[in-house]
Amino acid sequence: MLLIKCPHCGERAELEFRYGGEAHIARPADPGAIDDSGWADFLYMRSNPKGWHAERWRHEFGCGRFFNAIRHTVSDRIVATYRSGDKRPDIASLEAAAKR
Amino acid sequence: MRFSIFSLARQALGGHAGWPVQWRSPEPKTSYDAVIVGAGGHGLATAYYLAREHGLRNIAVVEKGWLGGGNTGRNTTIIRSNYLWEESEAIYEHAVKLWETLAQELNYNVMYSPRGVMMLAHTVHDIQVFKRHVHANRLAGIDNEWLSAEQAKAFCPPLNIAPGMRYPVLGAALQRRGGTARHDAVAWGYARGADRLGVDIIENCEVTAIRRDANGAVTGIETTRGPIATRRLGVVAAGHTSVLMGMAGVRMPLESYPLQALVSEPIKPAIPCVVMSNTIHAYISQSDKGELVIGAGTDAYTSYSQTGALHVTTHTLDAICELFPNFRRVRMLRNWGGIVDVTPDRSPIIGTTPVPGLFVNCGWGTGGFKATPGSGHVFAATIARGEPHPIAAPFTLERFRTGRLIDEAAAAAVAH
């Protein structure tokens, strides 16, 4: 079970959270302007990386708020969590920090 | 060597010292007519049918680990075809029909055992959904029948149907032709069959890049055992499909999740069929060795870790103990995870891709084992002809653009 640090509440057990999928997928600013391929990209295509992954979590049985996390999908190690709307942290520098 | 009672007797008299190797371990050639990436059941079946039915002989199957070491060796071996939509019924029933004669076809005992798959209903919604499935299946000529709770217990005596359970058993849908097969034997049987038709199975050979020409068409792959040229590349890599397709610049509508299973210590024959409960996330059968084979739901988050969290298996064992109080003192021996590639509509993707010469067979999610023969059969035809086999045609990658999804997630018996 993961120990996840909610940016609002601190570290809690994974059971308090619900996974929300890949983060930073922005809804098209002008929905009428994009074609079917654009919608397919937005709705269905996912990067699904074997490595660092920016993802959404919701602290369902806590504050109820969404936030983002950077997790490695092989080790499942979370190196950073940050509030929704905040800029995605630079993964290279997090990686370097994780090695230290 | 053909397996028969005579070959067995002859080898027995010779102290079993004369059995030949079942498949070669060849060095990769520089070029093949077709290369399949992934030597699991689906990939090996694809190579087998390409060689047997489409006359291709110069084929390689490359595998980064060992043959059958991924999800083929990690699943709970359940076979059934009681899906809701016609497209799904067609492909899963195609597979069940092939399962029925597979051991004879391959001259290899895959231990297909149609012992019945029973899916439990615990709520009014379950009853309505399962009855809808029963009717849809019977209209499609697929056996599926509704049982009352008492009939379910008669079919599977250890089942607890006490009304005081947290999620009481209100009835069940039973597919009698459903059952199990021996997962390793399926990989070994297809590997042996493909090898005898000249297919090179190259293990410990990880693909590191996909080479393309100026028009974007596939020209070959780079591997840890050197470059291999080919004009037809079939990716059958389950949980790692996104990674491989990324090498050709193709984004996929896939997310990879750990799916856990576990087996108990061996016990005497105790459970005569497969029992599944999607509502409380548990499925169980008994292997011929006597182990209870138990499957859980997927973990919550995408991962390539091949493990999974303990609370997921604990949750499943809670359900098993409630359904089968007899098993409460049975100890579990091993648990593990496999990485399953899940599509948004929980249906597979089989077919061509935007890259000429690149074919993909993926997205089988939590239920790919049952489809192994059918999947390999239609994918081989798709690669050989360069266009989808009629049964595979609805399962294109293109459906995510057109919106013609095959939504088994909400509708059918997909355990999540």
Image (cartoon, rainbow, N blue to C red):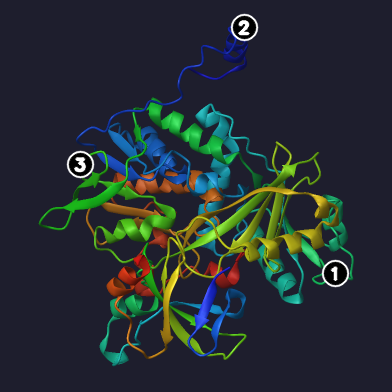
Residue at disc 3, secondary structure = loop
Extreme residue in the left direction = B214
Eyeballing the image, is B214 above or below B255?
above
Q: Are marks 1 and 3 in contact (CB under 8 Å)?
A: no
Type of the residue with mark 1? Met
Chain identity of mark 1: B
Q: Name the residue under label 3.
A: B227
Chain identity of mark 3: B
Q: Name the residue under label 2.
A: B13
Depth check: give the residue in front, B57 or B392. B57
> Does the image show residue B367?
yes
**Picture coordinates of residue B294 (x, y %)?**
68, 53
Type of the residue with mark 3? Pro
Q: How many numbered callouts?
A: 3
Task: Mark 2 or mark 1: name the one nearer the start of the chain.
Answer: 2
| Residue in the image at 43% along x and 44% along y | B377
Same chain assignment for discs 2 and 1? yes
Q: Name the quadrant containing residue B343.
A: bottom left
Does residue B127 appear left or right of residue B54 in this picture? Answer: right
Type of the residue with mark 2? Leu
Q: Name the residue under label 1.
A: B165
Task: Mark 1 or mark 3: name the one nearer the start of the chain.
Answer: 1
